[in-house]
Amino acid sequence: MIAAVLLVLLALLVGGCACVFWAERGGPRWARVVATVTLSASDLLRSSGKKRRWGQNPSGQDDD
């Protein structure tokens, strides 16, 4: 069951990336909509990751 869910998520990820690629080259309207949704989801995940990391290191300095 978990494998099926992971396969569906992988298919959505690959399909979203393909739509972003296609929309950049002037694809149909539905591909541009899917690309916009994919990029928006990516931005949300990226910003939530930054907030989580910021909470772990309250000084705001990198550990490099």
Image (tube, rainbow, N blue to C red):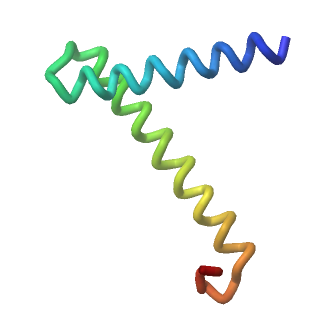
Percent position (x, y) of residue 8? 64, 14
Give me the residue at 62% from left, 57% from top. 49
* Image quarter hosting the N terminus: top right
- Looking at the image, the residue that sits furthest to the right is 1
- Looking at the image, the residue that sits furthest to the bottom is 59
- Looking at the image, the residue that sits furthest to the left is 26
Give me the residue at 41% from left, 26% from top. 17
Q: Quadrant of residue 38?
A: top left
The image shows a total of numbered marks equal to 0
Give me the residue at 37% from left, 20% from top. 18
Percent position (x, y) of residue 4? 75, 10
* Image quarter hosting the C terminus: bottom right
Q: Quadrant of residue 11?
A: top right
Percent position (x, y) of residue 23? 24, 24
Percent position (x, y) of residue 47? 53, 57
Give me the residue at 56% from left, 47% from top. 45
Q: Is residue 15 left or right of residue 64?
A: left
